[in-house]
Amino acid sequence: MSFRKRNLSHLSVLLLMALVSLASCSKPKTVILVSANSNVRTQFGLERLSEELNNAGYILTSEETKEANTESYKIIIGSTNDAAVSNLDWIAEPNTNKEGFHIQSNQNTIVVSGADDSGTLYGCIELADRIKKEGQLPRSIDFSDQPEMVLRGTCIGLQKTEYLPGRHVYEYPYTPENFPWFYDKEQWIEYLDMMVENRYNSLYLWNGHPFASLVKLDDYPYAVEVDDETFKLNEEMFGFLTEEANKRGIWVIQMFYNIIVSKPFAEHNNIKTQDRGRSIIPLVADYTQKSVAAFIEKYPNVGLLVCLGEAMNTIDDDVEWFTKTILPGVKDGLEKLGISGEPPIVLRAHDTDAEKVMKAALPIYKNLYTMSKYNGESLTTYEPRDSWESIPRSLSDLGSVHIANVHILANLEPFRYGSPDFIQKSTQAMHDIQGANGLHLYPQASYWDWPYSADKTEPRLKEMERDWIWYGAWGRYAWNCRRDRTDEIDYWIDQLGDFYGCSQYGKDILDAYEQTGEIAPKLLRRFGISDGNRQTLLLGMFMSQLVNPYKWHVYDNFYSSNGPEGEILVNYARKEWKGEAHHGELPTQIIEEVVEHGKLAVGAIEKAAPHVGLNKEEFERLRNDVHCYDAFANFFNQKVKAAILVLRYKYSSDVADLEAAVPFLEKSVDYWKELVNLTEDTYLYANSMQTQQRRIPITGRDGTNKTWVEMLPHYQNELDNFKRNIETLKTTGAGGQEAPVLQPAKVKVLNKNAKTYSLLPGQKAYSDQNTVIEEVADELQLLQGIQFSDKSQQEDGTVLRFENDKPVKVVVGYFNTNSYSALRPPTLETNAAANDRGQADIKIANAMRFNGLYPVNVYTYLYEPGVNELNLGKGRVLILGFIDGDVEIPVHDAGISETKDGVPVDWLFY
């Protein structure tokens, strides 16, 4: 299962090599190879089998050139319907399952028969693997096999770690400057060989708007994003890639986001390339439909993965766009080709109501697949619940094949991850809990920097080679997740023992992988803010994020869907204070468990270390990763213990509780320093997305805060602030940081008939509602809100037009609720542009309270001088006024809510 580079030559070359390099035995061994058909997949399987026969010392020949005085074998390769196979009277019941095969022997004759061309290919690879392991052909064999999952795919992003100049997220044309690796044919062969070795049958290419790099439109010639030379090169590469993939039974699928248009198209028509608030307009719909049609016509053997989310306005727009633009575009392309059969189209259930879209689409297009994330953009559990159970199950129940997307893995990067046990159980959960019958697999790390890993080496390591166990395990269990656990332990012991040249200690390396494999999933599901890629778990978390996670915008259903039932830290502390019974997986349980996992992993890897005979440099990198996980588990353990005491202070108001937390927080910084030492010379970064989308523990804007050494001053500062504020409490009895009163900025509101209101108790925020302010934070009381109609906000959305001479921030209030009547706050999980103006984080939590409505959290949007427009979506929201652009609001909790839950504690760390 390990990754191996392989140069496959033509069968005639292999035959010649075999004839001049006989096996070292007294009687030559000859194999007569009979290919029952000339299909490219059969021929590829034949080459793969021939290679291993040659390596084992067999002479490959045909009946016409059979040598005398040899020990002869005959291998017949073909599908079950080929005459050379079906005419044999001793052949048993054939395997007729899709991609299935049957290998049978009768004396010195072996037949490899496939239910289809892919089945024949996999049968050849199975036989080749047995020859490689045993060093000879099996004396007797009767083996039948087929995959469980219909689609088993990996993905590669044509994306980068940062935005291109003048462009937005996902906007990356296919050019040699942006993606030199895309034009490396040798590397593609290596990757495709890895895929077929692990029995993957689909390759997904992710990009925001690939069409302008791959097709030209007569009606929109100006839309192309690349020059003529690059365009021809892209045509050549797509042709090469699809041809080589097809040989290996792999279906290439091009992904794209909606609605995104090319930069030259947008500039020509004076529109944005992507605009979440823009409704469907005929120009963009026509351009997109014709782009899809041209792509299908040009590349009929390439599938499409459609993502309706992130740049679409409403769910109704999603339905209309898919049924009236995308699918008609596919049909137009097929009509031009004269093809009646429908190629498969995959609908991604991200940031949309996929069930609603599918129900509208199935009557007009049948060959549809669905895809949703497995554990969000992380790996947290093999017991998904709530939305990660109900959404995929509802899509599976529609009757089409549902694909589980193991996506981004933001909590695993960059350290090596390869727990076969966790992966096997996760694959079983895809079937049994989610109803999925397909796998879509992201790289284990460095998706945005592919093909390289984050390791600091020269030359840089390729991710596909470094993470061979990741691809091997997911591929193995996508094929069959019901394998016996005891047998699987033996299998992986052999794999690891062979790879590292220490067969007696493969179990210890496996133990290290499986112990570290529990640490990041457990910590994120119990303490994290999000299962999205805005959180880089292995860069740690701040105390404010542990003691008040909701201020940092916990994603809907995160705690209820990403693992077993249990308690988050704030609820655990409240129950402890009140003496209430605890339930399920507990924070204290998890920190004890991860520390033990780290300890056991270090013990196991150190036991194997003196005995490694192969791939020693890679073993040392794995060994270092194990120590990194151990240090991280200890860091988190100490920080959570400190947080528990801080949360106790919420109720006790006893400074002694805070003083007791100091040693734990100090120790957490010591463990972080250990982590810095382990990573400073071994890793270039932790997270491969190095933009403002990364928010937890801290912003990644401009490629900052991406290493452990960069985070150390932040954690040291947090500790210093905590100590200082404890002294403040002891000497003055102050109850928190005093937030400055916000001064209104001079702005001209351009909305027709705009009315304002004071942010004071008794004032009405809506022109058509009697709801009034009951309580408001002191720092807001000088501002003037802009009054809107509640009805118009919910039906039409909110548009604020204004003119300003100096930079200003618009102060916006979002209701802290999941109600459909309220506009959701900006969130990077579903809107990649949600921090373009610094609006992704709450500035003041629990800042206002209305009668009959929900608590309000305050955010700000930064605007440069000029005539500006803030366009918010449909739903209830508050425009609370304007402040100068250089004013920084210290993030804090004003504590205004109907239910008081102890004294505020966030201020202690600022």
Image (cartoon, helix red, strand yellow):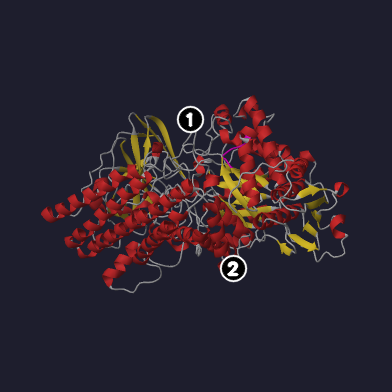
Horizontal side of residue 527 vs 349, given as left or right: left
Q: Is residue 557 visible?
A: no
Q: Is residue 58 above or below residue 279?
A: below
Q: Nearer the viewer, mark 2 or mark 1?
A: 2
Q: CA distance from mark 2 to mark 1?
A: 53 Å
Q: Residue at (40%, 60%) from the top-left corner? A: 603
Horizontal side of residue 892 vs 1, given as left or right: left
Q: Is residue 209 visible?
A: yes
Secondary structure of the residue carrying tag 1 is loop
Q: Position of residue 687 (x, y in %)?
A: 43, 45
Q: Residue at (22%, 62%) from the top-left corner? A: 649
Q: Position of residue 570 (x, y in %)?
A: 32, 62
Residue corresponding to mark 1: 166
Horizontal side of residue 437 vs 337, given as left or right: left
Q: Which mark is residue 484?
A: 2
| First-in-chain label (2 vs 1) | 1
Secondary structure of the residue carrying tag 2 is loop
Q: Is residue 821 above or below residue 277?
A: below
Q: Main secondary structure of the magenta part?
A: loop
What's the residue type where badge 2 is placed?
A: Asp
Q: What residue span does the magenta drawing correspond to?
A: 206-211
Residue 8, by quadrant, is: top right
What's the residue type where badge 1 is placed?
A: Gly
Single out the residue that lies furthest toward the left. 731
Q: Badge 1: how crowded within 10 Å, few (<14), some, or many (20+)?
A: few
Residue 372, by quadrant, is: bottom right
Q: Position of residue 225 (x, y in %)?
A: 59, 29
Horizontal side of residue 11 vs 647, given as left or right: right
